[in-house]
Image (cartoon, helix red, strand yellow):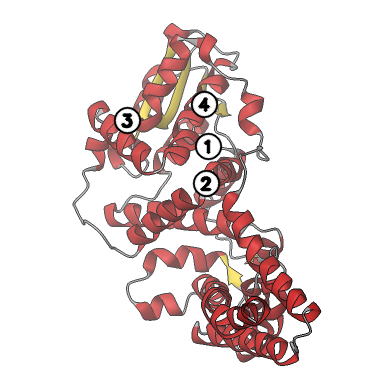
Amino acid sequence: MRRECLTIIGTAHVSEESVNEVKDTIYEQHPDVVAIELDRGRYIKLKKQMAGIEEDETISVSQIIRENKVGLFFTSTLLGYFQSKIGADLDVAPGSEMIGAIEACEDLEIPIALIDREISTTLQRALNKMGVIEKSKFLFGLIASVFGFGDEEDIDVEELKNPENIDDLMEMFKDEAPSVHEVLVHERDAYLAGRIMQLPQDRIIAVVGAGHKPGIEKYLDNPETLPDLRDLEVINEKRGIPWAKIFLALIPILFVVIFFLAYFSGINIAWNIYDFIIISMIMGFVGSILSGSKLISAIVGGLVAPLTIIHPLLAAGWFSGLTEAKFRKVRQSDIKNLTKIESFKDLWNNNIFRILLVVIGTNLGVSIATLVILPSKVFIPLFMKIFGG
């Protein structure tokens, strides 16, 4: 790669002007290679879209829950929805500028280089770096954007490509979610720059989001600051002490300790155990059924609730959600239809939303039992009997 022969086009991903700029630049310069901000998965998806191939394969929600990727799936779905919604409002499909680049390259028989990191790796690294509070703020912000809460202002997409506006936007993003900013912006700046530097061709056009252009240029001008790209592809990073998980794990341990102390103190705990089981089952069932689950899903959620309260690594919502997924097959069309939601009825008829709602509703019911009802009805009275005489 020769720095002086590199042209970086910063685009807005839902901009018709960006599409025209990309195609015109490729036709005018006829480079040796065009590097585009896509990974292989998204490239294949766009190629199928260009060929008119519509996929509607069943998504294995069961596998998502079993592999503990609910957060990753939920986040990627919301991000995809958010971008698609903007594109629909502007009548420009997300990724149109990349399609324009692909079409121009195929027309001129110019090779394409895929320079972006796998999207699943990027999102998982972001989730791994985020704390509980930051994760909650980030997801709430996405949900609020999806359902139209907060300030509604007309967005001039082309103005977002202005370097001054990009700086302001990135600083705001950094303040709201610094860990996400680090992974989605700085890490990808480094990754994209590193991949460009690895290209053997001299005359290169790189098509990237406008927000990444300043960071890429900074790394290209100072290559000694570039980190090892292999380090940026590692998902299982060691983080600090997970205090939130420790606290949540201590709650069921405390419950068990109180039961044992009461038992060894000669207190009859039979009815307390019955109360624990019945209250847990009722709240798991009620939380599931109120979230709109099938009867069998609510029954499953209720039955496993006592066990999941004692076992800190299990959640009743997983089981009710897995059961619900047996009856509500999620397809690619459910994700696409998220952009067409205009009313609560549309949302209610979307299988993705319904399954996630069942998971959340069941867990919420069991959480109320764990943090409010059981302590006041079962464990505090036992504790008073043990130490209060």
Q: Residues within 10 Å of mark 1 (few under 14, many from 20)?
A: many
CA separation, marks 4 and 2? 19 Å
Give the percent coordinates (x, y) of residue 270.
75, 90
Q: What element does badge 1 sit on?
A: loop
Verify CB contact (< 8 Å) between mark 2 and mark 1: yes
- Amino acid on which the number 4 mark rests in the picture: Leu
**Residue 387 visible:** yes
Q: Is residue 152 left or right of residue 204?
A: left
Mark 1, residue position: 38
Give the percent coordinates (x, y) of residue 232.
61, 30
Q: Quadrant of the C terminus?
A: bottom right
Mark 2, residue position: 46
- Image mark for residue 192: 4
**First of labels 4, 2 by sequence position:** 2
- Image mark for residue 21: 3
CA separation, marks 4 and 3? 20 Å
**First of labels 3, 1 by sequence position:** 3
Q: Residues within 10 Å of mark 2 (few under 14, many from 20)?
A: many
Q: Quadrant of the N terminus?
A: top right
Q: Is residue 11 above or below residue 66?
A: above
Of residue 151 and residue 90, the one placed in the foreground of this image is: 151
Of residue 208 and residue 164, the one placed in the foreground of this image is: 164
**First of labels 4, 3 by sequence position:** 3
